[in-house]
Image (cartoon, rainbow, N blue to C red):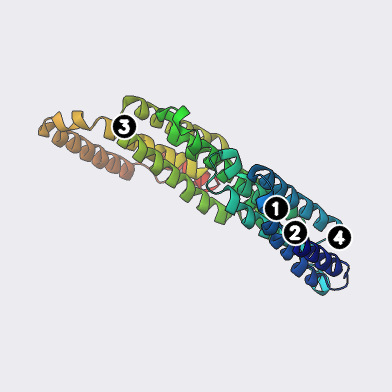
Amino acid sequence: METIPVLGYILIILFFLHIREWSVVRFAPLLLTLGLWERVSHLLDRIYLIILLFSCIIILLQAGRIFHKYLIGPKERVDAYSWTALGYIAYLITYTLFDNLIFVRILPLIGLGIWFFWNAGRWKSTIVQKAFYTAGTVCSYGVYLMILMDYRAWVPDLIEAELQVLPLLVIFFWIKKYLWQAIYITMNRIQFAVVLMVAVYLLVDAIQSHTIWDAWMIGGLSLLSMILGMQYKVKSYFFVGMGVLIFNVIYQTRPYWGNVPWWVYLLTAGILLITIASYNEWQKQEHHSNKPIERKIKKMWLSLKSWN
């Protein structure tokens, strides 16, 4: 009884695929193949069905590259094969979403990443190409997170948070350097926001863990961030690393600050005010051209402004 509707689907698909002048028409028969899979799905083991569906995604993508130069070309010639592959990816989710094996659950996201990378160069617009490469990279990071969360029982608690977010900095560095270097000012601002969010996430995790090893870890990472910021002249890494290092030192030594007598704070403030007043008086007595300290500070500030 299943043979007649299946043959009907095949005949309709072959008829419409024969039309080459108006490629949009191909969407109908290609989408009908999903109904064909639904008809025969109970005849196959679920794992074999998932493998076949994933193989069909690759076949559709390859067919799209063979028959079409662009995803959306001139005269409304749309690559129905590649766009239908998106439907296959969505259909694949229904079989993999609640699977016990992580390497089955990640297949739709892997397929989506492949779809973006495969079709990134098939646009006339350079911006759209870069957007596709960016989306594919984000999908790769999603696959990494899914695998990491599934195997979190094997990951030491000390480095779990670091393994979650630090690769994001590497990915963003690659995106900024090789994809969006033309808008580096905007990307620098986004980079500062990303680095700051990562730093806050790690700080909150360290405070919640409340162990000396987390404090050492945060201190080492912030110091490394400052070194990398100075080495590669990246303001976001330098200033965020410096801020995290200062906060970490103050937070970890807060019990000692609370036990210091009040007059020590008063004495420190007085010495600081006397030092500032003495410096200002000395500057007034010096000639305007002889201000080596101010010149060094100004030179340092100009150098920092030239950093990324």
The residue lying furthest to the front in this view is 1
Q: Amino acid at mark 1?
A: Trp
Instruction: Give the x, y percent position of residue 82.
Output: 75, 59
Horizontal arrangement in the rendering, residue 180 relative to residue 293 (left or right): right
| Residue 233 seen in the figure | no
**Residue at the disc numbered 1:** 115
**Residue drawn at x 32%, y 37% as measured from the top left:** 247
Q: Which element carries disc 1, helix, strand or loop?
A: helix
Residue 157, compared with residue 278, is above or below; it is: above
Tell me the CA gap for discs 2 and 4: 10 Å
**Residue drawn at x 86%, y 56% as measured from the top left:** 66
Q: Which element carries disc 2, helix, strand or loop?
A: helix
Q: Badge 3: few (under 14), some or many (20 or more) residues near its Cα, within 10 Å?
A: few
**Residue at the disc numbered 4:** 67
The mark closer to the camera, 1 or 3, is 1
Is disc 3 in contact with disc 4, using a CB cutoff of under 8 Å?
no
Q: Earlier in the sequence, mark 3 or mark 2?
A: 2
Viewer-closest of 136 and 273: 136
**Residue at the disc numbered 2:** 82
Instruction: Give the x, y percent position of residue 102.
Output: 56, 39
Viewer-closest of 3 and 62: 3
**Residue at the disc numbered 3:** 249
Q: Amino acid at mark 2?
A: Ser
**Residue drawn at x 73%, y 65% as measured from the top left:** 32
